[in-house]
Image: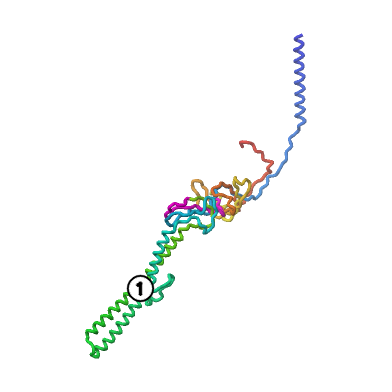
Amino acid sequence: MRMQFICLLLGTLLLLSGCNRKAAVQSKQDGGPIKVKVASVIIKELQRDVESVGTLFPFEEVIISSEIEGKVIKVEADLGDRVTPGQVLVGVSEEEQQYVLNQNEAQLQQALESVGLKNVKDKVKDIKETPGVRRAQADLFDAEQRFKRVRELVAQGVTSRQDLDQAQARFESMQAAYETSLHTARNMIQEVDRIRGVVDLQRKKVRDTTIRAPFTAFVKERTVNVGQFVRPNTPVFTLVKTDPIRLRIEVPERMAPWIKTGQMAEVTMEAFGERQFRGKIWRISPTVEQSKRTFVVEALIDNPSGELKPGSYAKARVRTDRFDRTKLVPVRAINYVFGT
């Protein structure tokens, strides 16, 4: 009984195995040959692009410093503010500078009066018209006339030779005094010009107590506070001009012939997703950095809203005038295998 069961089991297994083999062969025969589609390789002239990564820089960055010393009495801007040309940034006390200016203006007025001028802008047209020279000239004329009269009287025997000698001595003394007055007048005119310069410089110092923005920009940093005592060259603000903004990229030296000023660049940044910005090449470094074998290229990007920030990382694609003959195949014909 047991032997009959074993024989029946083996027979069943053999029967099933034969059926599976037949089905596999039948399945293979039903699949048939693999169908393929043939495409020709095309040779075409393609424009070459230069792709690189870089960093945004402000068009201009300037540190504003005080030109005079004094106490800060007001600060009119702060981080991130947009400032315009002439806008007040910092006010420094002008009390001391104004006091010095008043002294200088008083000295100038005295010097002007010494050469016969009333207004600061007036100039001496004729040195002989200055007060000191006119007095010396009048004294000289009087001494000359007296000398001539005494000489005539001596010739007539009316007066003594001693009177003539005295008149002649006085005439010669007035001649020397006249020459001295001319020399003094020249020195006084030069002194007026010198004091004018001192006054102009002091007036500038008074104006410098108000520190203003030199151009349209944004405040990058404020380094001064009300009540602080500043000296010449003390930094008070750092300003950046960001419209347009610079993009600085590095390009391999082998691509140097491809890059020219005026070419357009398509710029993208992670912060703006797929949005593209247009830039124009405007600066190309004349040298190659030996350690990297690259050279620096700068593009300008319009940034009226200020949304592009200096220091940001950016990708750029420069459209060049370079064309190469390239073999092309359909994308579907390329099989990408990981690791190859």
Q: Nearer the viewer, residue 333 or 33?
A: 333
Q: Nearer the viewer, residue 268 or 37?
A: 268
The picture places residue 213, in percent across and down from the top left corner, at 51, 57
Image location (x, y in percent) of residue 182: 34, 75
Callout 1 secondary element: helix
**Vertical comparison of 17 with 179: above or below:** above
Task: Name the residue carrying label 1.
Answer: 185
Disc 1 crowd rating (10 Å Cα; few below 14, some 14-19, many 20+) is many
Relative to 203, is 154 on the left or the right?
Answer: left
Q: Position of residue 294 (x, y in %)?
A: 52, 48
Q: Quadrant of the N terminus?
A: top right
Can residue 120 be found in the magenta stretch?
no
Give the residue displayed 49% in from the left and 48% down from the top: 289
Q: Would residue 231 be counted in the magenta stretch?
A: yes
The span picked out in magenta is 223-248
Residue 249 visible in rendering: no
Q: Quadrant of residue 146?
A: bottom left
Secondary structure mostly taken by the magenta-highlighted segment of the chain: strand
Residue 47, position in %: x, y? 63, 51
Examine the rendering and report whether any part of residue 333 can be seen.
Answer: yes
The C terminus, quarter of image = top right
92 sits left or right of 333 in the view: left
Looking at this rendering, what residue extends furthest in the bottom direction?
A: 156
Tell me if 108 is positioned left or right of 32 in this view. Answer: left
Q: Amino acid at mark 1?
A: Ala
Coloring basis for residues:
rainbow
